[in-house]
Image: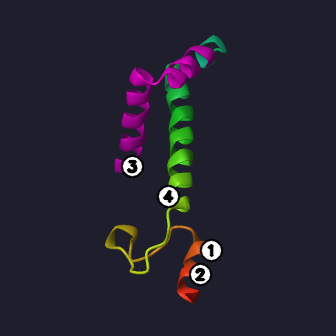
Amino acid sequence: MVGMHALYTLVLTRLRLDGWTRSYLVRRTAEGLRRREIVCCLQRYVAHELYQVLVSLPCSPRPSRLMGGRGCVNPERRRRAQRG
């Protein structure tokens, strides 16, 4: 639940500050979607963006407690890091 709240907060902040997000809201409202549905779409979009950033991060040779003891998010990069 905390992650969903964080995504919701990110979307609300983007709606206030980001021009692209505001224009997306206007466009989707004109298409007949409710604000709640639009926020849900934006949350998925933000989650996808964050995942892409996490996967592209370089692997750490030491496991991190923050990542549940794993050094990499991306399994392929984890295998490469383990090989050397």
Q: Name which residue lies at 50% across and 49% down.
A: 50
* Disc number lying in front (2 or 3): 2
Q: Which region shows up in magenta?
A: 1-27
Q: Name which residue lies at 44% across and 32% down.
A: 11
Residue 54 numbered tag: 4
Q: Name which residue lies at 40% across and 69% down.
A: 67
* Disc number lying in front (1 or 3): 1
Camera sees residue 1:
no
Residue 79 numbered tag: 2
Amino acid marked by disc 1: Glu
Q: Residue furthest bottom?
A: 83
Please check the rendered image and state whether residue 25 is part of the magenta-colored stretch, yes or no.
yes
SS at circle 2: helix
To which residue does mark 1 refer? 76
Label 4 environment density (alpha carbons within 10 Å; few <14, some 14–19, many ≥20): few
**Residue 82: x percent and y percent?**
54, 86
Of the two numbered discs 4 and 1 on the same chain, state the one appearing first in sequence: 4
* Disc number lying in front (3 or 4): 4
SS at circle 4: helix
To which residue does mark 3 refer? 3
Quote the CA–CA distance across marks 1 and 3.
Answer: 25 Å
Q: Disc 3, disc 4: CB below 8 Å? A: no
Relative to 51, say whether 34 is above or below: above
Who is closer to the viewer here, 32 or 22? Answer: 22
Tell me where residue 69 sits by quadrant: bottom left
Of the two numbered discs 2 and 4 on the same chain, state the one appearing first in sequence: 4
Q: Disc 1, disc 3: CB below 8 Å? A: no
Residue 56 numbered tag: none
